[in-house]
Image: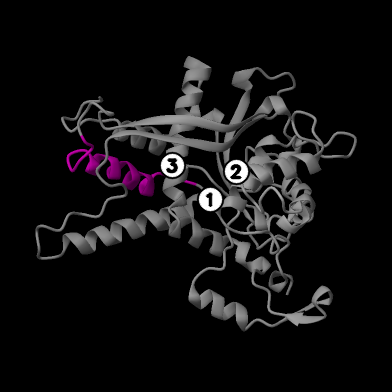
């Protein structure tokens, strides 16, 4: 029954500007409270950070009271986001109960920028049919690689890609090109990872750079209302009391919207699996450069977290049977898949690396 209750983040304002506002706040806030109060990393009060960021991203405009821009909603939700446990069986390197509020400033990088060369870069050849199969083969290989239960949804996504390909290849029209994970491209892919963080390996008391496990996280403010069928089901699951509105109502977003099956649908529908793989390639190369010959992805690469903020409810979260908190999608690409896919991205049509 508790999964039918409204999710804590239901009142959060939507839209791209609001999403940028929330991302900006998370980039600049210190995750660990000071004397019980959340502050910006530069010491500004949280109210000032929220207001400045709202004005910067055009949420409400410069002459609108920030309370009307859901300032108080974000102020109320922020401690819950930071205290929601990220740990669970999918990412065993994270100790039980670990949350963003455990992160020291020295153990996080916000908005890590990266550039991935595609094909020969701007001056090279297009990554075309010759190399696209190699890139896709790297993903196929992940289907047969032993992997934990964490990758079930990812493998399902890849299997659906291959199923579409089989349908295309069985068509009698030879002009139909096989379905690919990525189109033919060239140049550079530039992006930012919302958060890269590290935690000491188990049993290490005074860690150096090579004694940590590294993770990436992406913040999502999505309303996971889902398909029309899911919306119809939501309407049929009853109303809830809402004293603030003087009666009952049908929640637009319930806790079940941030359970594993719905997040898995969103990960596939929004191409977040592919995004997570590209981010993993970028972080893998970053760690190779930083840790040098000591880098071992089996030891140092922890995995990725997609944090659907509306569903994250703090230190006593609802679980959906997976032992991961609602709103927390955790997974880990195998090092073999990351390396093979990364190499295929930079391979020229002649079969050599540009």
What residue sits right under mark 3 in the picture? 277
Which residue is outermost to the front?
63
Closest to the camera, between mark 3 and mark 1, is 3
Residue 97 visible, this orientation: no
Residue 333: x and y, percent? Answer: 46, 42
Which sits in the foreground, 321 or 233?
A: 233
Residue 33 visible, this orientation: yes
Q: Residue at x 63, y 37 (%)?
A: 93
Q: Residue at x 50, y 30 (%)?
A: 113
Residues at circles 3 and 1 in contact by the CB criterion of under 8 Å: no
Distance from disc 2 to disc 3, alpha carbons, whole Å, reads 16 Å
**SS for callout 3:** helix
Which residue is outermost to the right?
35
Distance from disc 3 to disc 1, alpha carbons, whole Å, reads 14 Å
What residue sits right under mark 2 in the picture? 91
337 left or right of 94 in image:
left
Give, as a single range, the part of the protein colored magenta: 126-147
**SS for callout 1:** helix
Which sits in the foreground, 178 or 7?
A: 7
Residue 336 sits inside the magenta stretch: no
- Graded by Cα atoms within 10 Å as few (under 14), some (14 to 19) or many (20 or more), the crowding at tag 2 reads many
The quarter in which the N terminus is drawn is bottom right
Closest to the camera, between mark 2 and mark 3, is 3
Distance from disc 2 to disc 1, alpha carbons, whole Å, reads 8 Å
198 left or right of 291 in image:
right
Residue 148: x and y, percent? Answer: 51, 48
What residue sits right under mark 1 in the picture? 150
């Amino acid at each position: 029954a508790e999964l039918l209750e409204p999710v804590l983040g239901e009142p959060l304002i939507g839209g791209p500007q609001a999403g940028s506002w929330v991302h900006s706040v998370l980039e600049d806030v210190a995750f660990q409270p000071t004397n019980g109060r959340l502050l910006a990393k530069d010491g500004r009060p949280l109210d000032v950070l929220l207001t400045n960021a709202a004005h910067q991203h055009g949420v409400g405009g410069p002459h609108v009271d920030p309370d009307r821009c859901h300032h108080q909603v974000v102020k109320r939700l922020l401690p819950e986001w930071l205290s929601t446990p990220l740990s669970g069986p999918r990412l065993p390197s994270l100790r039980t109960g670990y949350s963003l509020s455990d992160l020291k400033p020295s153990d996080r990088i916000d908005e890590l920028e990266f550039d991935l060369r595609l094909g020969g870069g701007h001056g090279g050849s297009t990554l075309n049919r010759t190399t696209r199969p190699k890139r896709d083969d790297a993903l196929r290989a992940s289907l047969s690689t032993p992997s934990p239960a964490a990758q079930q949804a990812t493998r399902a996504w890849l299997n659906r890609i291959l199923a579409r390909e089989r349908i295309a290849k069985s068509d009698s029209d030879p002009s139909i090109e096989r379905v690919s994970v990525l189109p033919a491209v060239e140049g550079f892919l530039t992006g930012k990872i919302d958060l890269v963080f590290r935690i000491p390996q188990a049993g290490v008391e005074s860690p150096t750079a090579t004694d940590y496990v590294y993770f990436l996280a992406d913040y999502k403010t999505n309303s996971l209302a889902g398909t029309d069928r899911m919306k119809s089901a939501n309407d049929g699951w009853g109303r809830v009391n809402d004293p603030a509105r003087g009666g009952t109502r049908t929640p637009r977003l319930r806790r079940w919207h941030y359970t594993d099956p719905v997040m898995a649908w969103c990960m596939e529908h929004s191409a977040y699996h592919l995004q997570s793989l590209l981010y993993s390639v970028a972080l893998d190369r970053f760690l190779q450069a930083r840790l040098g010959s000591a880098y071992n992805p089996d030891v140092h690469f922890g995995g990725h977290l997609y944090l659907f903020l509306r569903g994250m409810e703090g230190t006593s979260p609802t679980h959906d049977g997976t032992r991961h908190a609602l709103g927390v999608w955790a997974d880990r690409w195998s090092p073999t898949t990351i390396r093979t896919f990364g190499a295929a991205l930079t391979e020229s049509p002649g079969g050599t690396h540009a």
